[in-house]
Image: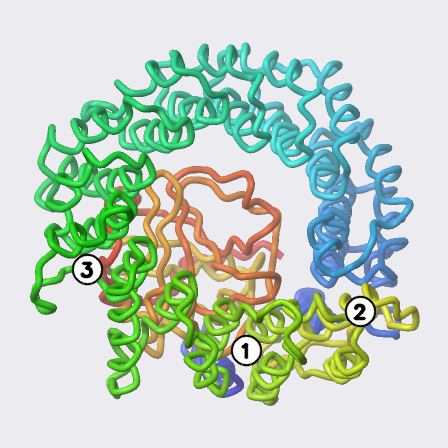
Amino acid sequence: MKKILSAIALVGLLASVLSCGRRPLRPDQWQRNLLYAEIVKREDLRQIGSDGFFRHHLGDPADPQVQQWCAVALGRIGDPRALPWLYAALRSAHKEVRAAAAFGIGLAENRDLLRSEGRTIHDRTIRELGILLDDPALAVRAAAVEALGKAGAPAEAMAIVRCLDRFPFDGSPAHGRFLESAITALMRLRNTAARPALEKLAALHDPEIQWRVANAFYRMRDRDARPALERLLASAHPDVKAHAARALGVCGGRATAALLRPLLMPGNPLPVRVSALQALVSLKDPAASAAVREAVSSQPAGEATPDQLDQLNFTVQAAAALGNLDSAENAGLLASLVRMQRAVADSAVVALAKTLRHDPDRFFAVLPQSRAARPWSARAWAGALAEVGGARAQDELKRMLVLAAQDQTGRREQLAIPAILPALARLNPPDMDSILAAYFASHDGVVLRSALAAYTPAPGAAAAWKPILQMYANLAGSTDVETKVALLDRLDPWLEVAEIQSFLRSALQDRERNARIAAARLLRRAGAAEISPDPGPASTAATDQICTLAATARQERTIAVIETDRGIMEFALFRQEAPLTVANFIALANRGFYNGLSFMRVVPYFVIQGGDPRNDQEGGPGYAIRCEINPRRFERGSLGMALSGKDTGGSQFFVTLSPQPHLDGGYTCFGRIISGLPVAEHIVAGDRIRRVRIREEKTFLDFRNF
């Protein structure tokens, strides 16, 4: 990664040289850039330092913008020693600083994060945020509500409800934004006692508020919200109708299913169709299979027109749904879908296996016998074999492993090993332990994780943790933090063993901060009381020069141009809110990393995801970068970093196809689409990224907001 970031530095220096004639920075502007660079560096290290830097600059009212940077950075770092400084910032005379401090507290005190790290919430957090609910500035109240949604327990929902009871909504954008924050917070707190307040908001007849209420009911899993959701389903607004349809899948009832089945048909917007499909699967509606088959057969799926592309994406989802509806009558249609475009075929072959799991001979009989004729991927085939089961499926999976061992090209079965091993483990062949032993010695983190997932030691087996320790040793000098954490977490059943505790203490010295955090959490669970709350700094390749360049370029208008099989998308990148994430993306783009990769994950009305050289959501550039979570919301067309846990981003990115409030404050948002949204909406799984270009846009006046 150091070489990559050094390349970023060189590019930045060249840009500075080529932009001669631009107005020079004043001393105060240069000083602010230096402060920003220092904040970025410490944030990337996940270290507040012992020199009082953050305490001084967060408390200095002379520069509110620097105070805001410090507050967000301290939230990202998450050191509990900084919480008193953030609490003090809640008393700032500047509303922007108070809002940033509340946001930072919400990041640092996120209950899910604290739980994953074996920590508990600070005793002042809820009280301090509660006071802010009466702040005179609406933006500050919104930030406090958002933070309570992340840090609070279900009981905090009622404080937000009381705040809503006295809120005079006037229909303005500012008021709307506050209500959006409150709805998202109630969604996260999952207290069904807030239902009456949400139903009252749904009655405002504001589509933006209504769909958010429906989304909240869905994520709260509130079965008693059915009457309100049925009213919202009658809306003419597609977003309201789509979210209401999906949420009704939680509520149950044949009458509800009867309302949803007609929404599957072409003529309804794709978001409504896929949401109704998801709901019908959740309801296990007996009549759904026939309705889905009719919806698939009523219009051709293809790539010639937008309507055909919508039908193609619907068919991918419908094939999976037919497998989960478990009706033998679906087999005929699924067998025909297996011969279609690859994304459809991958979905259909697994669904067909589920449908015919009680008749494996028929499953193998209806599929093409020639290996070359199979349009589905090796990973999908492995998943199908796991579903259908039986001796023939076991033999086929073992044959795939043999082919993988012979494959020197790095394609097909070799890349399918992470799917083959868990699939074989589900079938539990008697020689599974000996099969896994060969993969325990791998130095490939993805293979190790799959072997770990497939490893089920017999009850009472002696020293069953030994293979896990060996796998960890294979990664001794690796930066593969995801695999290290997965291995450490798997040791949980044996925490009382002295050898395990000794190993965990050695893992406290691992080069990867997340591994140290995981080891510390497990040791605390084992009863160790002397474990330091500070896991130490993260390893970083962000040099002083790189951080200074990030500061210098933070106000530049940078456009990422993503050329795909379907057309071109352009994104404005958020250099100031996510400087190192943007720098990493630019570096990968400039060296051609993304060229030729696929969008391996497409979920209509949710996301498209790309940037994985393995094409299975497991790959990356060989290193991880820190999250730069910021107040930017995930709206339609937002650009975010895909994660498998905190600070595990690399090259995989996603584009949201609709607003996703549950992602706000949990993933790094580092750009937004400025042209080509219809292209994003018609991407099909397997479509290629032909090229990613970076364009710097300069204005004649060179205006910057310092």
Identify the residue under disc 1: 480
Quadrant of the image occupied by residue 501 = bottom right
Left or right: residue 296 versus residue 229 is left
State the residue in front, 162 or 315: 315
Q: In percent of the image, x 28 and y 22: which residue is there? A: 287
Residue 656 on image: x %, y %: 41, 46
The tag on residue 414 is none
Residue 551 in view in this figure: no
**Is residue 119 placed above or below 2 in the rendered structure?**
above
Q: Earlier in the sequence, mark 1 or mark 3?
A: 3
Q: Label 2: state its secondary structure.
A: loop
Q: Label 1: state its secondary structure.
A: loop
Quadrant of the image for the C terminus? bottom right
Q: In percent of the image, x 73 and y 47: which residue is there? A: 106
Number of the front mark, 3 or 2: 3
Identify the residue under disc 2: 48
Identify the residue under disc 3: 376
**Is residue 340 placed above or below 285 in the rendered structure?**
below
Number of the front mark, 1 or 2: 1
Residue 250 on image: x %, y %: 49, 26
Q: Residues at badges 1 and 3 in contact (C-beta under 8 Å)?
A: no
Left or right: residue 18 versus residue 575 is left
Mark 3 burial class by Cα count in 10 Å: few <14, some 14-19, many 20+: many
Disc 1 residue type (three-letter): Asp
Quote the CA–CA distance across marks 3 and 2.
50 Å
Quote the CA–CA distance across marks 1 and 2.
25 Å
Q: In percent of the image, x 50 and y 67: which residue is there? A: 453
State the residue in front, 603 or 426: 426
Q: Label 3: state its secondary structure.
A: loop
**Is residue 672 placed above or below 396 in the rendered structure?**
above
Quote the CA–CA distance across marks 1 and 3.
30 Å
